[in-house]
Amino acid sequence: MAAKLTPKQFVITSLLNEGASHGYDLEQKIRVRGMREWTNIGFSSIYLVLNQLRDKGYVNQNTQVVNGKAQNRFELTPTGKQTLAAQIFKSIATVNKIDDPFDVAISNTVGVPGETVHHLLSERIENLKIAVNQLEHKKQSQLENGTPNLPSIMILFDRTIAAWDGEINFLESYKQKFVE
């Protein structure tokens, strides 16, 4: 069985797959591409992840002296590229369980007045509509700021928007069951 990358390792190896980089370069790519909208990786964890990947043999670290300063440049090893490819293929093809606290909360509403649940679902619907609107604006902003309009990038925005729109439609039709 192929080794599994953590979500942060998956992001970093994906970026390194584009070419060798310094940690700061990776931070810039994450920031410019708006990746923090859909991934939880802070600047401080980039070097920690790079060191983990190096220790696993997935990246090589080369130190160069530029203007009297040592700079570490990281690049994927063949093993790192194979591990990344396996994770990409598996992640695209596999349906993963959703780990959402909403499911736990809604399943524990037995004994809560139906009107209260109806109201809370209505509030969630409004919050989802706001989130969709914000993400649509973020997508437009990314395009205006030079993010390539590639399917492999736009799917990150469009999939989330479609999922939230689907949840809005589902909850709109389902919330009435709590007051019938």
Image (cartoon, helix red, strand yellow):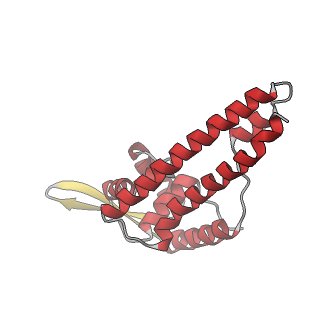
The quarter of the displayed image where residue 84 is located: bottom right
Quadrant in which the C terminus appears: top right
Residue at x 61%, y 52% (from the top left corner): 164
When the figure is inspected, residue 77 is found, relative to residue 172, above or below; the finding is: below
Residue at x 66%, y 55% (from the top left corner): 166
Between 175 and 111, the residue placed more toward the observer is 175
Quadrant in which the N terminus appears: bottom right
When the figure is inspected, residue 102 is found, relative to residue 57, above or below; the finding is: above
Between 46 and 111, the residue placed more toward the observer is 111
Instruction: Give left or right: position of 152 versus 103.
Output: left
Indicate the position of residue 7 as horizontal and vertical percent values: 57, 54
Between 100 and 66, the residue placed more toward the observer is 100
Indicate the position of residue 60 as horizontal and vertical percent values: 42, 65
Can I make out residue 7 in this image? yes
Instruction: Give left or right: position of 162 versus 14.
Output: right
When the figure is inspected, residue 80 is found, relative to residue 32, above or below; the finding is: below
**Furthest-left residue in view?**
67
**Furthest-front residue in view?**
180
The quarter of the displayed image where residue 62 is located: bottom left
Residue at x 65%, y 49% (from the top left corner): 168
